[in-house]
Amino acid sequence: MLRKSVREWGLSIFVLDCALGYLALVFRPAGHHYAIFSGGARYLWAGMSPYGADLGVPGIYLYSPSCAMFFFGLFSWLPQRLGQGLYMLASLAVLFAGGHALLGVMREKLGFELQGTPLRHLFWLMAGSEVLGAILGAKIEIFMLGVQLYALALLLGGRREWLAGLLFGAMTNWKFQPLPVIGLVSLILLVHRRVVPVFAFAAGLAIFYLAPAAFLPWPFFLEIHREWNASLAGFLPGGWLGQIYQHVYAFLVRGLGVEIGLRHAQLASVIAGATLAAVLLAWHARLRMLAGDALALRVGLLVAAGVGSAFVVLFNPMSQSNGYLLYLPLLLPVIWMARETGKELQAGVVMVVAFVTISLLYSDIPPRPLYRLAYAQAWKPLGVVLLLSWLGRAAYLSTARQRQALIIE
């Protein structure tokens, strides 16, 4: 057992991070994040608006009514420490189940075995660090990522695609973070005329938007949705460049001294998203010609989810350091492309540099002045930019090699 743990040191560190993080969480008072969400649930089920309300801790409730009522409402009636512990246990279980399902489908449909590459150690090391931070912050992103991984597994496997769409719709209603992922994934699906999950996504958005109306008076339902929109609109202009946020604009402003306003940042995000979508579609069209529909669909979905997850943490104006686990799907196409192009050593170097930038500098390991500098200047997104850039180059090389092989044949 000890020998196997040493041999699989990356996975061992991941398990240890999860276990120690969970123990640290349950043996301390409930944090602000859980208190805000559970407080929002109690307010809504009592027929009161949580938007702008004093929930007893610093911070305000900014998320959808469905998120509070139908998820945190399950735990909000318990003592806070017990409720937080059960909430995080459920979140970790969903994350493990979603990850297990996705890796299983990748093995079945793509012939990709994560445990068959030495890069697995770096994958688990990077995943463990970000999951640890999310556990200590009691972040809902853990549950959301697990659901997204499971939905992606359904799409890759071609099974219950309608359920995948509904799940993406639910998570997007809760927080808008998954929208870039489902947007890019939908482009690949539509190219292959797979419309069911796209329509199911729209249905999921509508269902979870309207679901609170079944339990709340209609005028109050309309009022809380107006307050939800107003709370986001009121918070962003003054809060999006706060020290806790680690998106590319924070790096530009705090790290490089570039002056940029929220409206210009939003426009830049639209341009960046459109550019990534165009590049993805062009690459996918080439892959489809060379590899055929079936493989192009599966690889396209994997890469689209990875690129979308990178966009989420890079361009979301509320992207926090302890929510960066949402970028982890990017690592899977990086590792897959490394194997396809024979560039595993190069990918390993890139992943090490990214790990230092994304995780290590934000831990208790580096000297405190270096940690404070990285945090203040928002260096964290640079690691994701590096991974995304390497993936783009590797994807181009992969199709170039396939084209050369066809020419030789």
Image (cartoon, rainbow, N blue to C red):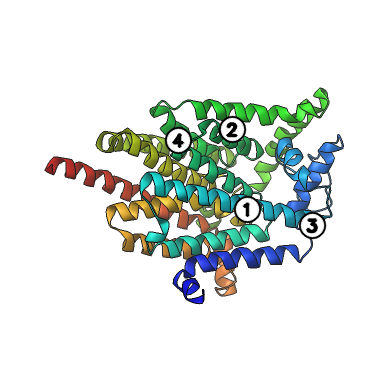
Q: Do the residues labelled 2 and 3 touch (CB within 8 Å)?
A: no
Secondary structure of the residue carrying numbered label 1: helix
Q: How much space separates mark 1 and mark 4, taking CA atoms?
A: 23 Å
The image's mark for residue 164 is: none
Q: Which of marks 1 and 4 is nearer the N terminus?
A: 1
Q: Can you give x and y, in whole percent of width and height, for residue 355 in the image?
A: 47, 63
Q: Earlier in the sequence, mark 4 or mark 3?
A: 3
According to the picture, the residue beneath numbered tag 3 turns out to be: 82
**Quarter holding residue 210:** top right
Q: How much space separates mark 3 and mark 1, taking CA atoms?
A: 17 Å
| Residue 308 visible in image | yes
Q: Which amino acid does label 4 sit on?
A: Gly
Q: Residues within 10 Å of mark 3 (few under 14, many from 20)?
A: some
Secondary structure of the residue carrying numbered label 4: loop
Q: Can you give x and y, in whole percent of width and height, for residue 240 in the image?
A: 63, 47
Residue that protrudes farthest toward the top in the picture: 218
Q: Which amino acid does label 2 sit on?
A: Leu
Q: Do the residues labelled 4 and 3 touch (CB within 8 Å)?
A: no
The image's mark for residue 166 is: 2
**Foreground: disc 1 or disc 2:** 1
Q: How much space separates mark 2 and mark 3, taking CA atoms?
A: 30 Å
Q: How much space separates mark 4 and mark 2, taking CA atoms?
A: 15 Å
| Residue 271 visible in image | no
Secondary structure of the residue carrying numbered label 2: helix
Q: Is residue 212 left or right of residue 349?
A: right
- Give the camera-side residue of 164 and 279: 164
According to the picture, the residue beneath numbered tag 1 turns out to be: 93
The image's mark for residue 158 is: 4
Q: Which of marks 2 and 3 is nearer the N terminus?
A: 3
